[in-house]
Image (cartoon, rainbow, N blue to C red):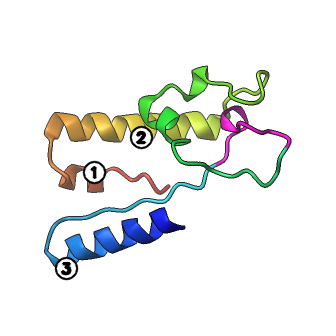
Amino acid sequence: MLIIKHAATEASIKYRAGIPTWRGRYFAIWPNLTPFPNDSNVGAYRGSDVYLYLGTAKYIHLGNRTAKPTEAELTLSSRYVDAWLTFAEVSHVDTLLMLDLVN
């Protein structure tokens, strides 16, 4: 909870100062990235999105060695990687607005 509150406060301060600011919240739960597959109370955890950003989710099997990444997971990972590569190539934050990561 504290992390969310601090992120919201920081984003609000930057926004009021006229600094372009984006904030995202990640809630996805994937069978191959769940460290405790038998515990339904475990949701997305800090750092669980890193595998998707790096494009390595298809190689990771945390708690369930037989779980394979879903098609939706691989698609989302591909879109994250594309967004970061585009941003690095063009190096301007407005380019991320052109990429529709929501749909």
Kindly identify the amino acid type of the residue bearing the numbered disc 3.
Answer: Arg
Q: Give x and y (percent) for residue 14.
A: 21, 70
Residue holding disc 3: 16
Mark 3 and 1 residues: CB-CB less than 8 Å, in contact?
no
37 inside magenta stretch = yes
Q: Is residue 82 above or below residue 8?
A: above
Earlier-in-chain disc, 1 versus 2: 2
For the point 15% across and 48% down, the residue is 92
Earlier-in-chain disc, 3 versus 1: 3
Q: CA distance from mark 2 to mark 3?
A: 27 Å
Kindly identify the amino acid type of the residue bearing the numbered disc 1.
Answer: Leu
For the point 15% across and 67% down, the residue is 19
Outermost residue toward the right in this view: 38
Magenta range is 29-38
Rate crowding at label 2 as few (under 14), some (14 to 19) or many (20 or more) other CA atoms within 10 Å.
Answer: many
Kindly identify the amino acid type of the residue bearing the numbered disc 2.
Answer: Tyr
User: Which residue occupies the foreground of this view, 46 or 50?
Assistant: 46
For the point 33% across and 41% down, the residue is 83
28 inside magenta stretch = no
Judge from the rendering whether residue 36 lies leftward or rightward of residue 50; answer left or right: right
For the point 33% across and 50% down, the residue is 99
Residue holding disc 2: 80
Q: SS of the residue at dot 1? A: helix
Q: Main secondary structure of the magenta part?
A: loop
Q: Which mark is residue 96?
A: 1
Outermost residue toward the bottom in this view: 16
In this view, the mark in front (3 or 1): 3
Q: SS of the residue at dot 3? A: helix
Rate crowding at label 3 as few (under 14), some (14 to 19) or many (20 or more) other CA atoms within 10 Å.
Answer: few
